[in-house]
Image (cartoon, rainbow, N blue to C red):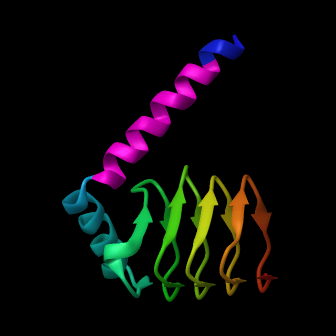
Amino acid sequence: MVEIEKILEKEKEKEIWKELGNREKRLEILSNFQKEGVIIVDPEHTYIESKVKIGKGTLILPNVFIFLDTIIGENCIIWGCNVIIGSKIGNSVKIESFCKIEGAEIGDLASLR
């Protein structure tokens, strides 16, 4: 059973990178987030999977990767060079640069360094 789970994980990972590796598709996804009130400073250098949910007023700086059904609340600040994978992040959270957040649940008003 573990072998099947590993195969399914690899397939999901391939699909994500297929989506994020296509510049036009990636920019379309980011444009949709911007229409919903997410502030993306540099779409050319931001990578967010389409299944992610991000609240209005959240600011995302360059070189950020967000995927695997992550949920981010409203009015957060995500500094550059972060990776967020399969996590739930509350409202008004500040994530400073160079964090890797995976499978985490972070409450409102938290600040990560």
Which residue is painted at 41% across and 71% down in the image? Answer: 46
Residue 106 position within the rendered picture, expressed as x and y whole percent measured from the top left: 78, 69
Residue 74 location, quadrant: bottom right
Quadrant of the image containing the C terminus: bottom right
Residue at 40%, 88% in the rendered image:
41
Which residue is at 73% across, 52% downward? 103
Count of numbered tags: 0
Q: Is residue 64 above or below residue 80?
A: above
Q: Is residue 98 above or below residue 85?
A: below
x%, y% of residue 16? 42, 45
- 66 with respect to 37 (left or right): right
Which quadrant does the N terminus fall into? top right
Kindly identify the residue that appears in the image at 30 percent across and 71 percent down.
Answer: 32
Q: Residue furthest left?
A: 24
Is 69 positioned to the left or the right of 46 in the image?
Answer: right
Most common secondary structure along the magenta stretch: helix
Q: Is residue 15 left or right of residue 7?
A: left
Residue 48 within the magenta-colored segment of the rendering = no
Q: Could you say which quadrant of the image residue 72 lies in?
A: bottom right
Instruction: Looking at this view, name the residue that lies furthest to the top.
Output: 1
Q: Quadrant of residue 75?
A: bottom right
Answer with left or right where residue 75 lies relative to residue 16: right
Out of 88 and 13, give the one closest to the viewer. 13
- Above or below, 1 relative to 20: above
Q: Position of residue 11 (x, y in %)?
A: 46, 28
Above or below 109: residue 55: above
Residue 55 image position (x, y, % from top left):
52, 77
| Magenta-colored span | 5-21
